[in-house]
Amino acid sequence: MFLTISTTGSPERPATDLGFLLHKHPDKTQAFSTSHGTAHVFYPEASAERCTAALMLEVDPVALVRRGQGKGRGGAPDAALAQYVNDRPYAASSLLAVALSGVFRSALKGQCVARPELPEEARPLRVEIPALPARGGVELVHRLFDPLGWALVDVEPVPLDERFPEWGDSRYVRLVLEGELRLADALRQLYVLLPVLDDAKHYWVAPDEVDKLLRAGDGWLASHPENGLISSRYLARHKRLTQDALERLELVRLAEADGSEVEELDNAVDEDRDTEERPVPLAVQRREAILAALRAAGAARVLDLGCGQGQLVQALLKEVSFTEIVGMDVSMRALNLAAKRLRLERMGERQSSRVTLLQGSLAYTDKRLAGYDAAVLSEVIEHLDVERLPALEYAVFGSARPRTVLVTTPNVEYNVRWETLPAGHVRHGDHRFEWTREEFRAWADGVANRHGYAVEFVAVGDDDPEVGPPTQMAVFIQTESTTDTPKEGEAA
Ligand code: SAH
């Protein structure tokens, strides 16, 4: 059983960083004893330009049978010869997945103590598995890996015997994956999908398998079109566990819908990053700029669209001039955290009558949003795919049509000034895009023209003479009050 992971690099961003990511030194050959045999990790090549790590699992078939784990589902109790003469030692399979999680535990979790920024970075990866048992064949391998963001998914059937092509193909395929991904994401996909393709789990499925599946599926499984098949096979077709997994995935999917990211809400990554080593955190400066613009506009009834955990809603509540505050987000998880932060439950009636939290998506028109003085979209647009922006545009500027709209978004030009941000990277993994000042201006001018608004731009944070400010804000003021009709291509 054999799997290689390769990456390429440059002197500034050496490929040998793979060693840090995997917590295995490229100069060493290491062996780890696992419950099924010995796992070897070594690097066939390790230079700044190219680095390949190989994981080879030497399975002890006798140990496997003694552990009662070589039987497959149903497990006949007799020690038939077939149990000893099985394909486990040759195929990359669920055992390899288990070895992967044992040997590369920290990498799978995306942890790297020595270089904490590394796991966050997507890098060019190539994964090769020469012999992968695949029940469902080439077609299923594509259905499983194609939706996961790999640029190349190359699957070739392995013939039973090359000398006798008429014998047809074996149940193995050779799999090559190539793309820009975070290593932890790639490893977690393999950890789940290798046993799914093998479809013969070697251990009994326990209820905590659902937790394992959800943990390993974090960030990709909920929205995977085949998550039904994946869960069912991963859980050895156990109906109740599969049902449980699918229900929990559906909750995750709802929270993730339209680009919100669950972990982001837990860690407030956006904010942490922005605030690093800064006297006044950028998130605070942004909030101040928004409040100032809302005061200047004389707004009393305010929408916070994509409110996240409700920091702005909380700040708005502190000022009596804001009489009605609505926080909306697509993520229920975010809204629950916002409710906690605001202590909605313990709030007096007067205070609580000023605030409403709504679940909704900016990709759809929503009657509940009509008739407000102002709407804020703080660090939200970059969480939607660019193709969705016309729908958001129509929902906010065409349908809800508040008098004032504030939109903030990162200025990508400023990224070179973040010491902790590697070149060419966005500030957060879930940002679908980050714009230059010119790109933002072009979008905002277009929106203003199409919907009867005038727009001005405000720099938020240190306005660097060369690259501009870290955050850019557009202030839209309505000039034509007529509700416009949807133009073609704008309908939500
Ligand atoms: N406004 C907050 C949070 C920004 S993070 C702040 O400035 O700190 C982006 C937020 O947008 C997330 O909470 C995410 O759930 C939400 N979001 C993403 N897509 C959305 C959509 N289509 N509709 C509504 N909210 C969305």
Image: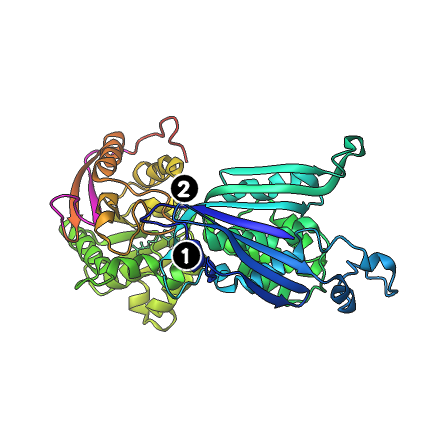
Instruction: Give the amino acid type for the residue marked by disc 1 in the picture.
Output: Pro
Mark 2 vs mark 1: in front: 1
Q: Where is the C terminus found, in terms of image quarters?
A: top left
Compare residues 260 and 183 and report the one nearer the observer: 183
Relative to 250, 270 lies left or right? left
Relative to 286, 270 lies left or right? right
Residue under the image location 86 percent in, 64 percent down: 79
Q: Looking at the picture, how far across and down is residue 482, in whole percent?
A: 26, 33
Residue under the image location 56 percent in, 46 percent down: 224
Q: Is residue 465 above or below residue 114?
A: above
User: Of helix, strand and loop, which mostly describes the magenta segment?
Assistant: loop
Q: Earlier in the sequence, mark 2 or mark 1?
A: 1
Give the extent of the magenta segment. 463-482
Q: Is residue 26 above or below residue 483?
A: below
Instruction: Give the amino acid type for the residue marked by disc 2 in the picture.
Output: Ala
Question: How dense is the environment of label 1, judged by Cα within 10 Å: few (below 14), some, or many (20 and up)?
Answer: many
Q: Which residue is mark 2?
A: 363
